[in-house]
Image (cartoon, rainbow, N blue to C red):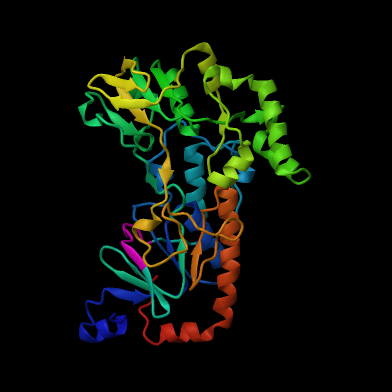
Amino acid sequence: MGSCKENQQENPQQSNCGFVQGPIIVGAGPSGLAAAACLSNHGVPSLILEKSDCIASLWQHKTYDRLKLHLPKQFCELPLMGFPEDFPRYPTKFQFISYMETYASHFSIKPKFNQAVQSAEFDSGFWRVKTQDFEYISKWLIVATGENAEPVIPEIGGMEKFQGPILHTSLYKSGSDFKNQRVLVVGCGNSGMEVSLDLCRHNANPHMVVRNTVHVLPREMFGFSTFGIAMALLKWLPLKLVDKVLLLLATIILGNTDQLGLRRPKTGPIELKNATGKTPVLDVGALSQIKSGKIKVVVEGVKEITRNGARFMNGQEKEFDSIILATGYKSNVPTWLKGCDFFTKDGMPKTPFPDCWRGSEGLYTVGFTRRGLLGTASDAVEIANDVAQLWKTNKDCRSSCNSHIILLK
């Protein structure tokens, strides 16, 4: 493989590769920003590559307007800078975006936008990261594209026949576009529940498909956040016992959700989240609409999409004007990280939490803990501490790069 130095000698005016001082970070979402800020705090430079035209592109372009943080803001802060004091307990989507923009500005983080990473591979002691028009080379690579990089689109027969719109929640903005429509919502996680609630508030008629089991918990219990209660209890009690306490309190507050078609898994909510990443639904009003019949729960899975609606596993067919796929997101790491066995075929680190942040050969990951923004913050701090030690002690690394470097800023 040719080096940047060789390319420069052959055509010094048109070199399309360069060495980066400090780590290359792929992704300018919360994970990438947190990693860059923590590195900067140690005096270590970095370069963020972002395929979109802005920071936090998932939040800016692929979330619905009514979205708020599901957890209180103190559990969603990035390292080294908290939320403004005048922000509400559960900041809106737009407030969170504002916070991230201020965060990037405060730490002078300037990603290279419109740089879609096509491949990243370790070769001869360096990571070579190729985008559509440049090759970036560094001793360290930080994967910060996260667990939710790409929408999951299920393969359901007949989708091409449907006369109305079919869209993933990544394209859904507001229920105002569906006023007075019969809408099939496929999926019952936090997105499915909140989209159904939003549709209700805009006089649509949502039918929510609940094929699998799901934990529904109140967002707050007796004036305290459910997540905060769980975190406090876990300091003193075993996880399984905490799950039992949460489920008992949830039943007292919400009633028996099984009677509404929302069957609970046998595994407790925290244990399930840690094992599979499946997040419990934190109810913000959808359950009351289900109880009133305004959100209709469909317990049969969708067998196929028809011209005017959907046919279900029990053979029943219903007509719908629109279909919304609340089917979640997935990692995209396997599509571009080459020759690396640190990740599973699903794009998640094979090493479990809390050690999933560090691979080998200078590879790091941030935002793959299945523990939300708290996990992201923890990863970023660990990575920065580790890289900073190498940066300060491994002078050979910097001198070898500097001998033939195209410094990228």
6 horizontally vs 383: left or right: left
Q: Position of residue 106 (x, y in %)?
A: 52, 58
In the image, residue 5 above or below residue 218:
below
Q: Position of residue 323 (x, y in %)?
A: 33, 26
In the image, residue 209 above or below residue 376:
above
Q: Quadrant of the C terminus?
A: bottom left
Q: Residue at x 44, y 18 (%)?
A: 200
> Is 256 part of what is drawn in magenta?
no
Query: Observer-nearest residue: 320 or 15?
Result: 320
Q: Which residues are magenta?
A: 112-120
Q: Which image quadrant for residue 85?
A: top right
Q: Position of residue 240 (x, y in %)?
A: 70, 40
Of all residues, the one furthest to the right in this rendering is 236
Decide whether the magenta segment is chiefly helix, strand or loop: loop
12 horizontally vs 279: left or right: left
Is residue 79 at least partly visible in the picture? no
Q: Position of residue 140 (x, y in %)?
A: 46, 71
Is residue 38 at least partly visible in the picture? yes
Count of all numbered marks drawn on residues in the image: 0
In the image, residue 336 above or below residue 227:
below
Q: Residue at x 48, y 27 (%)?
A: 193
Q: Quadrant of the N terminus?
A: bottom left
In the image, residue 40 above or below residue 300:
below
403 horizontally vs 8: left or right: right
Of all residues, the one furthest to the top in this rendering is 292
> Is 116 part of what is drawn in magenta?
yes
Query: Observer-nearest residue: 181 or 52?
Result: 181
